[in-house]
């Protein structure tokens, strides 16, 4: 089955830039989405269609795509950004399959 | 206020069945695709099923043939019938809405399913 690969963890100091990658063979053909999840809470959509930001999401969150890798960038990281981040996309083989990456724990030092 | 509220979780024995519900409010439910996503304790998100606005349904191999997603637009409700439950189905189950390529932009708070003897 189709897989999306994320690093298990990323650590940054407050005010620095965090970059979380997600790799998958179908990413050149399928949109990617990013979700933030804090402990005990439901996920929140922070990026859709590779690089679009939903209303209410701070401008410091941005997304980009290059080949088989998409990247979530958080500029000027704040303590409140510490959370798990999941990428999500779909298979491009013709079967409808929604796939999540394994998740990345962002630690703000 | 746009809201999704799940219910129906609980403790069930292996091999048993459970039906989850998701009540939608604050938006035109019939215009959105709906998904179920689960998360085992300490683990990542796993997509469980989806239903389109026309009633088309989709499942991953892990639940196909055991789980059935359905919707009742007149009641603004989404359902997940889960049969032949296994210990590996133990998780928090979330419902989420999606439209076109806009992603799962609204999620419920989740309902917990525990499969154990």
Image: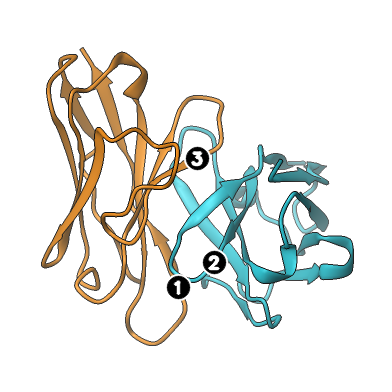
Chain colours: A orange, B cyan
Give the camera-side residue of A67 and A23: A67
Determine whether the residue tagged by mark 3 lies in a helix, strand or loop: loop
Q: Position of residue B34 (x, y in %)?
A: 63, 64
Q: In front: B4, or B91?
A: B4
Q: Label 1 lies in what chain? A: A
Q: Chain of mark 2?
A: B
Mark 3 chain:
A
Q: Quadrant of the C terminus of chain A?
A: top left
**Residue under pointer 1:** A97
- Which numbered disc, 2 or 1, marks the residue closer to the eye? 2
Task: Note whether residue B90 is visible.
Answer: no
Q: Up-down: is B66 above or below B46?
A: below
Q: Position of residue B24 (x, y in %)?
A: 76, 52
> Would residue A53 be found to the left or right of residue A17 on screen?
right
Q: Are marks 3 and 2 in contact (CB under 8 Å)?
A: no
Q: Along the polypeptide, which appears first: circle 3 or circle 1?
A: 3
Residue A1 quadrant: bottom left
Q: Is residue B13 left or right of residue A40?
A: right
Contact between marks 2 and 1 (CB within 8 A): the answer is no
Q: Are marks 3 and 1 on the same chain?
A: yes
Depth order, front residue of B115/B45 = B45
């Amino acid at each position: 089955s189709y897989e999306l690969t994320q690093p298990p963890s990323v650590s940054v100091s407050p005010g620095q830039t965090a970059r979380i990658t997600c790799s998958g063979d179908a990413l050149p053909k399928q949109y990617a989405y990013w979700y933030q999840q804090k402990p005990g809470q439901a996920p929140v959509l922070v990026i859709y269609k590779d690089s679009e930001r939903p209303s209410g999401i701070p401008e410091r969150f941005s997304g980009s795509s290059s080949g088989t890798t998409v990247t979530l960038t958080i500029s000027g990281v704040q303590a409140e950004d510490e959370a798990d981040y999941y990428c999500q996309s779909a298979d491009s083989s013709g079967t409808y399959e929604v796939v999540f990456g394994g998740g990345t724990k962002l630690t703000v030092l | 206020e746009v809201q999704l509220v799940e219910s129906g979780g609980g403790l069930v024995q292996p091999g048993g069945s459970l039906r989850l519900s998701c009540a939608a409010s604050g938006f035109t439910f019939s215009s959105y695709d709906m998904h179920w996503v689960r998360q085992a304790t300490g683990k990542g998100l796993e997509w469980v099923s989806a239903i389109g606005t026309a009633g088309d349904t989709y499942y991953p191999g892990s639940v196909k043939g055991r789980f059935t997603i359905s919707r009742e637009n007149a009641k603004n409700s989404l359902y997940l019938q889960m049969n032949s439950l296994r210990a590996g189905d133990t998780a928090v189950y979330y419902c989420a809405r999606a439209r076109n390529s806009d992603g799962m932009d609204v999620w419920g708070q989740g309902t917990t399913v525990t499969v154990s003897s």
